[in-house]
Image (spheres, rainbow, N blue to C red):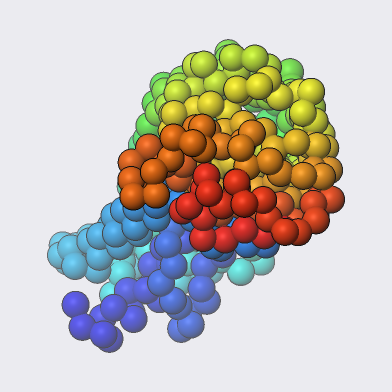
Amino acid sequence: MGATATAALVEAVPLQGEPEPPAGRGEFRSPDPVFHASADHRHPGSIFCKARFTAKMELFLVLSTLLLACSVSSQEVPYEHLMAQLQACPKECRCPPSFPHVVYCDNRNLKRIPNIPPYTWYLYLQNNQIEMVSEQALRNATQIRWLNLNRNKITDEGVEGGALKGLKSLLHLHIEDNLLNMVPSQLPASLEQLHLSRNKISKIPLGVFSGMGRLALLDLQGNKLGDDAITEQSLKGLNGLVQVNLAKNNLKRMPIGLPPTTTQIFLDSNAIEKIPLGYFRDLPKVAFLRLNFNNLANGGLPRNIFNLSGILDLQLSHNQLTEVPLFPLTLEHLHLDHNKIKSVNGSEICPVPISTLDDNVIEGRPRLRYLRLDGNQIKPPISRDLMVCFRLLRAVVI
């Protein structure tokens, strides 16, 4: 694919859920993250602490999405399909002839969804005044794979029963920054990512995720979910969930009912005070855990609560901790900034006895590479034992 074709592809098929680059000023960006945290919750220094696992998965997602996008441009569209698509293009929208599977209806001040052409894969309706997702408007658009309805005025009553259920090819659904009070029902079983952040959601109806074993990412940050809303029954059906984002809700305890496939748990900016003993027993794949901006104190953390064999990134910034919690050999990034920690004893927090470490042997050595301790009451210099134990450290912020 030549440079001109590539530029046109990027312009016509934005690869990130939102926001998309305006026409004529496009640039390639990775898809919405399934395997890394959203930009809304990054803290200073986090740019340096992407785990290798994250990088590999992010690369995989970028490449797979690029291949999907390339298929839009390279696939030969039958002439009759092309003409049908262009002739059915709503007058309020833009349907690039070079990319007949893409329909742009964003930033048009629309109050309703126009009738969408039948061969649409990517539909962009963000930044409008839409109040209703009607079955009629999407009746013919059964091939949609990516639907963006962010920043509209959609309510629970505005989502008609069969409007989304009929989209049997839908992979990514974005209804962020709307007026929903509950997770929409009758979602298609094909969904892989569901983005519902910054609504007013306080309820997850029982059975709403039934049959949705393909859903890998569930983003509910910035809503009004309380402890009673998140139960084993309300999450039943999410057998393939990888990332769950429940940051900026009204949680006072750790969510229950998360499936054992969950790898990333984001719980920043809640009011969580403790983690129950054995909480992670049924969550063996947790690799990224974020609990920044909560009310955690050492008394609320059982001694070996973070002794998880696969954990890579642990974030406990802006809590009430007075001591560094114990953590396993596998951990690579630890955020403990803005707590009440006064000292760090390298011998006590080292996952293995320091006396057993051999400078010439990497195997069995703690993998910690990044440590944030700023905003505490720790005074330099750094403990020598800390550096002896964690020889792989590349950055320590105090």
Quarter of the image with the C terminus is bottom right
Residue 259 in view of the camera: no
Q: How many marks?
A: 0
Q: Where, by quadrant of the figure, is residue 29 drawn?
A: bottom left
Left or right of 51 on screen, residue 277 = right
Name the residue located 53 percent from the left edge and 49 percent from the top edge.
Answer: 388
Residue 345 lies in quadrant: top right
Q: Is residue 369 above or below residue 165?
A: below
- Where does residue 258 sit, x and y in percent of width and height? 54, 23
Q: Residue at x 84, y 50 (%)?
A: 377
**Residue closest to the eye, 189 or 85:** 189
- Give residue 218's position: percent from left, percent from top: 54, 37
Q: Position of residue 246 (x, y in %)?
A: 65, 36
Of the 4 image quadrants, the one containing the N terminus is bottom left
Q: Residue at x 45, y 23 (%)?
A: 284
User: In front here: 168 or 222?
Assistant: 222
Residue sitting farthest toward the bottom = 4
Q: Position of residue 376 (x, y in %)?
A: 81, 50
Of residues 123 and 256, which is closer to you in this image?
Answer: 256
**Residue ranking furthest to the front:** 355
The reply, left or right, for residue 394 in relation to residue 246 is left
Residue at (65, 14) in percent of width and height: 277
| Residue 74 seen in the figure | yes
- The vertical placement of 232 against 172, above or below, is above
